[in-house]
Image: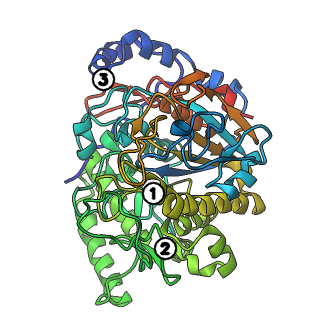
């Protein structure tokens, strides 16, 4: 089914009388007319006056689905009681006065390149990927399993892609490098007990602004610790370890079917061109969208540039080992290769594998076995290697690297389950940024003494989106319109956080 694009109009320099009439529809989404007017009143010129505007030329977004515990990552509490601090201790880092969890020794060594935010907060201690990755102001759990529900707002990576498509439309001729790519597969598509989840999609902008999803092909070589003790089977999980012969392709579009020769493919393309010429008088938005998708598929099939970028086997074995022979590690390496090849927004998800319930970083059971044996080692190797690799190649200064999650985990450890547990918690959690105009070596905000609430400088996911847009040279106060011509502020109620910008 074809999806129509939203209107390309952006409200960057004030509002017209007609625009004010459209605002009434925002009340349905939790935004008042006054708030929308306030957002729209700040012009692109004022955005451009702030430091860092347009400093980042590209973005790599890493998402730890589940979500990651602040205590065992970026905000350990060495002076807290044992039921708060837990089994894992703090270690000093390269950023003076900012300890990290002992499970991240390599990340601690690159902390002086990072901007660590320890005061993230929002109202929803739920699996709310779509809320965390879009401007939508409210959330309900039923939306999480409905990725195409019309209530969704576009993923902020999709909005960046849409902006770039409007400012510099891509020619259909020649090789094409996708601006917006998702790794290692369609989000949450590799579970037995639940379908694809909401979050990283174009929503009313149209499916052509979804990420171009890669597909992982390879064998896992290690069984991951169980996420639940009642789990009926164990899973050999590629996030735990993979065979070095692994590779990434584009699902359904990255290579020819085995039975289709190059001559036969060219014949099909010529025939398709004849059909296209017969319908060119039908100049509708849907037709343009269809032609764009055709061009994308054809370019992916014929482009050696993008296939080469996905081919991590071209890298030296020692570099691949530094990233880690895990799915997350090799996905981070592929992300670096893709931005080097010209992609502008690459999303890497560490999502659930095998079983959704309690999967990935959602440690309602086996908290410490999963952290120690599986989650922290894989993340530590990949994340630290990505930061150093980008820096050594001269790419970090203009590449914004975001490490995000949908919430944090409870300050009080639940000792009842075997292996202990921390449960959902959104009052305070941590994220990390690097490169692309962010501070090199900074810790922003504080949690209280037990890591349970924000002590100062509360920052929301929407603030991260607004700051990302600003660093990418996109006015964060822009408004996009849906199919009913209703205006949506691209960063919701988020504000550019000057504290994060160098």
Q: Categorize mark 2 by other alpha carbons within 10 Å: few (<14), some (14-19), many (20+).
A: many
Q: Categorize mark 1 by other alpha carbons within 10 Å: few (<14), some (14-19), many (20+).
A: many
Mark drawn on residue 476: none
Q: Which residue is mark 2?
A: 241
In three-dimensional space, the C-alpha distance between marks 2 and 1, rounded to whole angstroms, equals 13 Å
User: Which of the 4 quarters of the picture holds residue 316?
Assistant: bottom right
Q: Residue 4: x percent and y percent?
A: 27, 44
Along the viewing direction, whichever of 120 and 99 lies nearer the viewer: 99
- Foreground label between 3 and 2: 2
Q: Residue 408: x percent and y percent?
A: 47, 38
Residue at 69% in and 78% down: 318
Q: Would you place residue 9 above or below residue 172 in this image? A: above
The quadrant of the rendering that contains the N terminus is: bottom left
Q: Residue 41: x percent and y percent?
A: 52, 15
Q: Give the mark, 3 or 1, whose residue is nearer the N terminus.
A: 3
User: Which of the 4 quarters of the picture holds residue 140?
Assistant: top left
Q: Residue 151: x percent and y percent?
A: 26, 34
Q: Give the mark, 3 or 2, whose residue is nearer the N terminus.
A: 3
Q: Would you place residue 492 above or below residue 17 in this image? A: below
Q: Which residue is mark 3?
A: 29
Q: Give the mark, 2 or 1, whose residue is nearer the N terminus.
A: 2
Q: Secondary structure at mark 3?
A: helix
Residue at 71% in and 40% down: 437
Task: Check if mark 3's residue and mark 2's residue have beta carbons within 8 Å.
Answer: no
Q: Which residue is mark 1?
A: 350
- Foreground label between 3 and 1: 1
**Res. 436 in view:** no
Along the viewing direction, whichever of 358 and 303 lies nearer the viewer: 358
Q: Categorize mark 3 by other alpha carbons within 10 Å: few (<14), some (14-19), many (20+).
A: some
Q: Would you place residue 205 above or below residue 122 in this image? A: below
Q: Secondary structure at mark 2?
A: loop
């Amino acid at each position: 089914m074809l999806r129509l694009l939203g209107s390309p109009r952006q409200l960057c320099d004030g509002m017209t009388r007609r625009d004010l009439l459209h605002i009434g529809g925002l009340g349905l989404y939790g935004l008042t007319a006054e708030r929308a007017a306030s957002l729209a009143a700040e012009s692109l010129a004022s955005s451009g006056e702030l430091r860092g505007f347009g400093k980042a030329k590209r973005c790599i977004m890493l998402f730890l689905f589940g979500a990651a515990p602040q205590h065992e990552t970026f905000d350990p509490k060495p002076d807290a009681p044992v039921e708060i601090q837990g089994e894992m201790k703090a270690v000093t880092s390269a950023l003076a006065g900012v300890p990290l969890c002992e499970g991240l020794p390599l990340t601690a060594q690159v902390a002086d390149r990072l901007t660590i935010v320890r005061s993230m907060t929002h109202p929803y201690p739920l699996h709310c990927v779509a809320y965390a990755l879009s401007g939508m102001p409210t959330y309900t759990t039923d939306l999480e399993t409905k990725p195409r529900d019309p209530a969704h707002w576009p993923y902020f990576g999709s909005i960046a892609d849409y902006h770039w498509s409007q400012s510099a439309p891509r020619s259909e001729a020649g090789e094409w490098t996708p601006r917006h790519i998702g790794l290692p597969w369609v989000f949450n598509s590799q579970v037995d007990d639940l379908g694809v989840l909401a979050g990283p999609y174009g929503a009313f902008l149209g499916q052509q602004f979804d990420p171009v999803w890669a597909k992982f092909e390879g064998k896992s070589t290690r069984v991951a610790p169980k996420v639940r003790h009642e789990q009926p089977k164990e899973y050999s999980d590629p996030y735990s370890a993979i065979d070095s012969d692994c590779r990434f392709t584009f699902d359904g579009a990255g290579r020819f079917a085995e039975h289709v020769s190059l001559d036969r493919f060219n014949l099909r393309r010529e025939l398709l061109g004849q059909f296209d010429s017969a319908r060119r008088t039908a100049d509708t938005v849907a037709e343009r969208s269809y032609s764009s998708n055709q061009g994308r598929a054809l370019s992916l099939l014929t482009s050696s540039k993008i296939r080469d970028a996905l081919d991590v086997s071209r890298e030296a074995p020692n570099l691949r080992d530094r990233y880690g022979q895990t799915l997350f590690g090799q996905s981070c390496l592929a992300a670096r290769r893709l931005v080097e090849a010209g992609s502008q927004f690459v999303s890497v998800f560490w999502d659930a594998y095998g079983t959704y319930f309690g999967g990935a970083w959602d440690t309602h059971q086996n908290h410490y076995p999963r952290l120690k044996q599986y989650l922290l080692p894989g993340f530590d190797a990949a994340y630290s290697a990505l930061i150093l690799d980008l820096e050594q190649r001269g790419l970090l200064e203009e590449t914004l690297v975001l490490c995000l999650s949908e919430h944090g985990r409870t300050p009080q450890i639940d000792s009842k389950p075997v292996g202990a547990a921390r449960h959902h918690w959104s009052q305070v959690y941590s994220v990390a940024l690097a490169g692309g105009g962010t501070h090199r070596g900074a810790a922003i905000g504080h949690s209280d003494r037990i890591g349970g609430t924000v002590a100062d400088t509360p920052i929301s996911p929407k603030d991260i989106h607004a700051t990302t847009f600003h660093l990418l040279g996109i006015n964060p106060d822009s408004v996009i319109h849906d199919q009913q011509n209703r205006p949506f502020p691209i960063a919701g109620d988020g504000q550019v956080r000057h504290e994060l910008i160098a």
